[in-house]
Amino acid sequence: MFLQSKGSETLIEIKDKDLEILFNPLKNEIEGRIQEGEEEQDPQPFSKQELTFASGEDLPRCWIDPNYRT
């Protein structure tokens, strides 16, 4: 899955194995790889608060807010 950094609009790849962390509102950070250049970048942590979908839409609140109630 590709997400985007709010500040720089850089695409960040989230590996399939890390999607459970993305969906878990108790986890504040997720590991991803910036998509720049031809070589794969080293993974680094990103705050889920600073990520959006590539379309610019915010992540669902239930993914980032542990106090969210439906």
Image: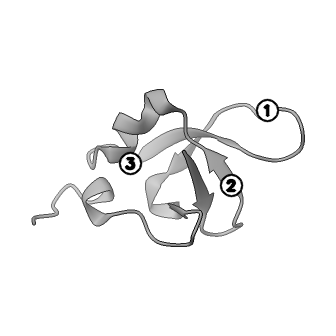
Is 47 placed left or right of 40 in the picture? left
Q: Residue at x 59, y 39 (%)?
A: 32
Residue behind mark 3: 28
Q: Are marks 1 and 3 in contact (CB under 8 Å)?
A: no
User: Closer to the camera: disc 3 or disc 2?
Assistant: 2
Residue appearing at x 10%, y 66% in the figure: 70
Q: Quadrant of residue 14?
A: top right
Q: Is disc 3 surrounded by few (<14), some (14 to 19) or many (20+) residues within 10 Å?
A: some
> Quarter of the image holding residue 15?
top right
Q: Is residue 37 left or right of residue 46?
A: right
Which x, y percent locates residue 6? 60, 68
- Identify residue for label 2: 11
Q: Which is more toward the observer, 55 or 61? A: 55
Dot 1 or dot 3: first in sequence order is 3
* Picture coordinates of residue 34, whole percent (x, y): 71, 45
Local packing at callout 2 (Cα closer than 10 Å; few below 14, some 14-19, many 20+) is many
Choose mark 1 or mark 3, whichever is in front: 1
Q: Secondary structure at mark 1?
A: loop
In contact (CB < 8 Å): disc 1 and disc 2: no
Which residue position is annotated with label 1?
A: 40
Mark 1 Cα-neighbour bin, 10 Å: few <14, some 14–19, many ≥20: few
On screen, residue 5 above or below 58: above
Image-quadrant location for residue 58: bottom left
Instruction: Name the residue at the right extreme.
Output: 38
